[in-house]
Image (cartoon, grey):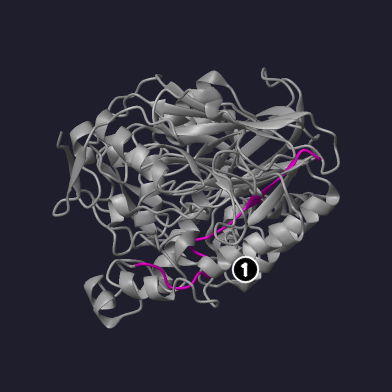
Amino acid sequence: MLFTRLLGFAAVASAAWSGNLNYRSPSHHHPGLGIAIHKVVKRSDISSPFDPAKLNFTHGVASGDPYPESIILWTRVAPTMDNDKSNVTVTGFVPLYNHDTDEYVALSKSPVCVDWAVYVDKELRRAVTHGTAYTSSDIDYTVKVEADGLSPYTTYHYQFAVCGSSNSSPVGRFKTTPRKDDKVNSGSIAVFSCANHPFGFFNAYGNVARKDSVDWVVHLGDYVYEYKEGDYGWGWAIGRAHQPNKEAYSLYDYRRRHAQYKSDLDLQHNHRQFAWIPVWDDHEVGDNQYRDGSSLLNNTEDSFIKDGGVSVDQRKMNAVRAYFEWMPIRQVDMDDNLRIWRSFSIGSLFDLIMLDTRQYDRSITDLYWNTDYVHAISNDAGRSLMGSRQENWFYNQLIKSNKRGAIWRIIGSQLVFSRLNASLALGPENPFNYDGWDGYVSNRNRTFNVLYENNIGNNIMLAGDIHSTFVSDLNWYGNKPYNPETGEGSIGVEFGGSAVTSPSPLGPNLTFAQGQFASEWVVGNNPTLQFSDIYYRGYYELHITHQEVNAKYFGMPSILTRNPYEVPFANFTVKNGENKLSRPLSGGTVFNGALKNKQTTQTNMTHNTEDNSWFISN
């Protein structure tokens, strides 16, 4: 009888270890990234647990990657706010400084045991599924579990608790997606990108949660930034300096950076309220990241020595591991540790296709010292933003979505897809952003060819990265006829959103007048671009029905303080079957920015090329 009970306990313990997905994320089969659970279990002492009163849910809760019958739930419960600098080894104790108590904490071999449950009611009376998971310093005391047995298109609430105690986390909420063939009348998403902690408070995240205006959140990347303080932003002035104060390279660096960002109260509020569908951009690893490196760390001897002997692969391994530890995201392919591209079907209403145009397998990009070279090869047929495997998957997803009868195809791409002359900021010699789709023209041509050749319409591209608002008709410009006034010839629409806090491409101190001038210039010099706003930091929402997609843009009046204010500055509509922005654009009126053929100011601006600043020169 005792032997049977012991076997039962062993089975529960085993399930609790393997139930925490972070022990096998991002790849159970990659020895440099996965965690050997049997080694962790061997040196762990379950019989001597932490005192629950000394454990804290340090960064709230989060949910993500919603499916019709399951969801990913996340939290962190730890004896200290600080992050793990290295894995606890079989030798046992590793001292860790606790900034809260100004003392060193001896982290024992004990894991932390956490119960979790999902409820149909916000009072947490009726649980539909529950489980237990262990966590430890090996994964920075993060907990990530998959809750299954859920019903499609249903709102749930959830909570974590330290096993055998009343020490519990905040209550979170999420909504599952409908089944693939379910008839759904409407759905909505908020779209965010580029939240740089030193530049300001994450008010945009909190505003969506306070309004409770959408079903899900899509994040297009740059959730964190890798820079050291002073290289890109001076957060000390508002109490938001980067930690640690260095360029992120080590596993601890990236863990600490994620922890700092998730300490923002508005970001925590948003995570509690909505299930997220995120992808990374470049700064989750390094600026202008590509397959073989980034702008500050690429496969050259000089780069290797300058950055302290950190290799490209080591840095990417550390960044990717920390990302999967700290984000509520599934590992799509356990044999492919860099695959983050995936898709979601929201009934028959729309398919959401999330791309990775930064990390996976993209060809060399603009690293600042090679701009002329990348310009020269931007039309090369062999260049790809995604690599052949992801490209083929992407095209197949578009074709399958069209064949199955999904009304809309919504494509999350980190980078602006449309051709964009940005010589106002970049100069006339290299007027296009060769770090974006304009540097991979053949990849964009292949995408357009799939859409036009297969008569795939109702396409909505989402873009971030550019720290400005850009709204365009999608047209294979130069290859297919296009009428800028009516939009005829388009195959869809692109909605590009501004940053949560990252500064305008023309600088962080841009005035209204400067932003208006730049917006009018860029709209006037790009045929398919129908609207731009370069001034506001913010986000946008998509409200999707069978009849139309409505995009609502919101700007933050100030991000230098935490506040709930926002300005709804433009709305756009795409009608089912029209494949273009409905005219008159935004009903003919926007609060800020420039509509095509509706310039409103005559301010003359002069560009100082030495410091990339602008000044009024009337």
- What predominant SS class does the magenta segment belong to? loop
Tell whether 322 sits left or right of 506. right
Magenta-drawn stretch contains 20: no
Return the x and y of residue 141 as percentages of the image width and height. Answer: 49, 48
Instruction: Indicate the quadrant containing the C terminus: top left, top right, bottom left or bottom right.
Output: top left
Q: What residue would you read off at disc 1?
A: 336
Is the residue 259 above or below the residue 57 in the image? below
Magenta-drawn stretch contains 363: yes
Is the residue 483 above or below the residue 426 in the image? above
Return the x and y of residue 445 as percentages of the image width and height. Answer: 59, 65
Residue visible at 32% across and 41% down in the picture: 504
Residue visible at 49% across and 27% down in the picture: 570
Residue visible at 25% across and 43% down in the picture: 507
Amino acid under disc 1: Asp
Is the residue 33 above or below the residue 498 in the image? below
Return the x and y of residue 418 as percentages of the image width and height. Answer: 51, 53
Closest to the observer, 432 or 405: 432
Furthest toward the bottom, the residue is 301
Residues in magenta? 348-366
Return the x and y of residue 200 as percentages of the image width and height. Answer: 31, 34
